[in-house]
Amino acid sequence: MSVNPDIQVERDTATFRSIDVTHMLDGSPEATNQRRIRQKQIGDDPQINRRNIIFMSHEERYEAAIARGLRIEQLKAEHDWDIMDENNAIMWCFSDIAMFVHKVMFIPAIERLGNKEQHDKWLPLAIDHKILGTYAQTELGHGTFLRGLEMEARYDKSTEEFVISTPKHSSMKWWPGSLGHSSSHAVLLATLYIDDQNCGMQPFIVQLRDLNTWKPLPGVEVGGIGPKMALATTDNGFLVLNNVRIPRDQMLMKYAQVSKDGKFTKSGAAKANYSTMMLVRVGIAHSCYFSLAVGATIVTRYSAVRRQGEIKPGAPEVKILDYQTQQLKVIPSIATAYAFHFCKEHLKWYYIETFQQIQQNDFSGLPEIHCVTSGLKAYMSDIATAQLETLRRACGGNGYLLSNGITNTYIQTLALPTVEGENTVLYLQVARYLMKCLKVAATGEAVKGSLSYMNEKIKTPYTSGLVTREDYSNVKKLLKLYQNMTVRLTQKAGDHLNKLHVSGQPKYEAWNNTSVQLVNAAKAYCQTYVLGMNIEGLSTQAVDLPGDALEVIHQLCVFYALHGITEQSGNFLETGCINITELHIIQQEAQEMMAKIRKNAVALVDAFDIPDNLLNSTLGCYDGNAYQHLYDSAKSDPMNQKQVLPAFEKYIKPMLQGKHTSKL
Ligand SMILES: CCCCCCCCCCCCCCCCCC(=O)SCCNC(=O)CCNC(=O)[C@H](O)C(C)(C)COP(=O)(O)OP(=O)(O)OC[C@H]1O[C@@H](n2cnc3c(N)ncnc32)[C@H](O)[C@@H]1OP(=O)(O)O
Ligand SMILES: Cc1cc2nc3c(=O)[nH]c(=O)nc-3n(C[C@H](O)[C@H](O)[C@H](O)COP(=O)(O)OP(=O)(O)OC[C@H]3O[C@@H](n4cnc5c(N)ncnc54)[C@H](O)[C@@H]3O)c2cc1C
């Protein structure tokens, strides 16, 4: 099929070469090459490719998802994949791998929470798939408030065993992925009691099913919790345990230990048992970039080939991408995807470094990384889901089809603001950190890390620093506005908190009555963080780009900063970080920048370099022949393989013959 001329002209008139930017996104030309080889291995594989899943039943899809998980293992061995190759393969199809939680939570939990003997015993079994596991933490009654978990593990000194039980309905496990039908074991989080003394939430390895028959073991009641919006094959389940006994060495004992005679000891940081969640929050930030890159690619390409209506009366119909309002739906998602790329790269290295320190028992970096990973997980998933919905709607009626590739991406991404810590709750964790830093800055001590800008801003009066027109495209000056706004919102929340406290409210009540401001300040902190990482990326990852490509990546960053101010103008104005005249100039500059980026929109999404067989989209194929692909997909619907469906003889015909009132 030849390439649609409407999309070809976009590529021919771009001011830079997409491939240069692709190399930047991958890190080097060699890395691009390597990724392409790996993507071909997964994209061309009939068991991994998800071309036909939209026509499958739930059960067919589940089976295919198991097969896909196994196939990834085979490919890994066949082609000698490293951990990054494997993670990328998982990332591409995580919503359709039944044993996904085994890989991203069960194994990492044992690695992080187990001691040496436990690693030696359990990791080989898990890595070789001799056992399959889930991460069972959430209960019917509690997901957020972990100190409230009710499933009990009581230590029995006489037998050196833990007895695990579910005292009431609210204490059953509810939601763990792969628990329903696909796990033999669980890393199960339960409240430990020794002689009726509550020793907090601890992790245990519990076998749930017989490895030969797959039947639940005595005392274990397990099943699926029912159909969901998406992620149908991650069979989330419930679990009731009736006095199930496990040996003492099946409590994961890296950070807390129970001796044979029932003595409880702790080592490491207080929240060390929460470390698996932090890893997955980093994975989620990564996945938000992926989802947005997919969505932006599909919708930008479709908008460049779909012609509808006219701008100049009587002139030929225009590409919908030429409408300014359509640009406002599409260009912010391209700019955000690039900003998220720089941010997730930074986060990856930051996490790896801090994790290495933790391994050496240095926990000093934990509060800051907990704040950053919680905040970015929340912020990036909030933005990704909002923008994906805008993108989906930007496809008009075809945005409602499953074959468009964006609908599935959107509904699976919708889980991310909830899983691994509900977003509001995570923003409130960020706010705790903001309040602590504010206290430090107020005493004149230096705040370190990502909030070090507080030191300067808390003392100096605010001026926008926007004097000349050039200042409005100076990303460093724009970043200062964001930092000002974050500090001011933090101070305002802090002042409100103090005021309520001084007026007699207990601290906890004052906190709840300030939580709207606190969340607002936390979001501002996250937005500032992402912009900061985008700017850093310009001078690190993008610095070697040819001039024309660098200019476009720079334009995207300027647009990202300006557009963010227009979206949050209330915060910027209310805190006095800009005035209304400056806001009007910013709005104008953002629109002009958007028009410049429009010219390169297709080339910018081409640079994400997502092959058709992974994009799985009728609307967003590289060749731009959306109508042909839509038609082909409709024709391949199994319901279209028969001219007349059985329902005709059964119901429609009797109705046409006036027999519908008699008993069918
Ligand atoms: C690997 C391969 C990757 C491949 C590709 C991956 C692709 C991924 C793509 C998508 C993935 C989708 C996966 C879906 C799986 C979902 C799994 C789940 O939901 S599982 C279920 C997920 N469930 C959840 O996420 C539950 C959410 N709830 C929670 O995490 C907690 O209840 C809480 C944090 C909200 C409060 O905890 P509470 O004990 O009441 O604490 P307080 O309020 O009393 O005090 C706060 C103090 O604690 C401190 N601190 C806290 N956390 C940490 C930490 N991690 N560290 C350090 N510190 C921490 C904090 O700083 C503060 O310090 P301070 O101010 O006092 O000095
Ligand atoms: C697709 C999917 C997969 C999942 N996989 C797993 C898994 O593998 N393992 C596992 O253990 N769990 C899993 N979960 C559960 C998930 O981690 C929890 O649902 C999540 O942590 C939110 O907790 P919750 O359901 O208790 O929400 P709730 O806490 O009940 O949230 C409801 C509302 O209350 C608000 N709220 C709650 N507490 C506060 C507070 N302190 N301050 C202000 N507002 C508050 C929230 O903001 C939200 O608006 C999964 C969930 C989903 C949807």
Image (tube, helix red, strand yellow):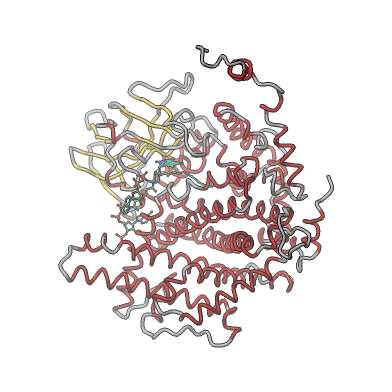
Q: Residue furthest bottom?
A: 467
Location of residue 435 with respect to 389 vertically, above or below: below
- Quadrant assignment, res 526: bottom left
Expressed as whole percent of the image width and height from the top left, the position of residue 654 reads: 59, 15
| Most foreground residue, 401 or 287 | 401
| Most foreground residue, 498 or 101 | 498
Query: Quadrant where the N terminus lies?
Result: top right
| Most foreground residue, 438 or 638 | 638
Query: Is residue 662 found left or right of 112 in the rendered image?
Result: right
Expressed as whole percent of the image width and height from the top left, the position of residue 488 reads: 37, 75
Location of residue 258 with respect to 350 vertically, above or below: above
Expressed as whole percent of the image width and height from the top left, the position of residue 394 reads: 61, 53
Location of residue 635 with respect to 543 vertically, above or below: above
Query: Is residue 573 found left or right of 262 in the rendered image?
Result: right
Which residue corresponds to the image point at 50% horizontal and 43% vertical from the top-left? 104
Q: Residue furthest top?
A: 663
- Quadrant assignment, res 404: top right
Query: Is residue 504 found left or right of 64 in the rendered image?
Result: left
Q: Which residue lies furthest to the front in this view?
A: 658
Expressed as whole percent of the image width and height from the top left, the position of residue 261 reads: 22, 37
Q: Which residue lies furthest to the left in this view?
A: 504
Count the labels in the image: 0
Which residue corresponds to the image point at 57% horizontal and 80% vertical from the top-left? 472
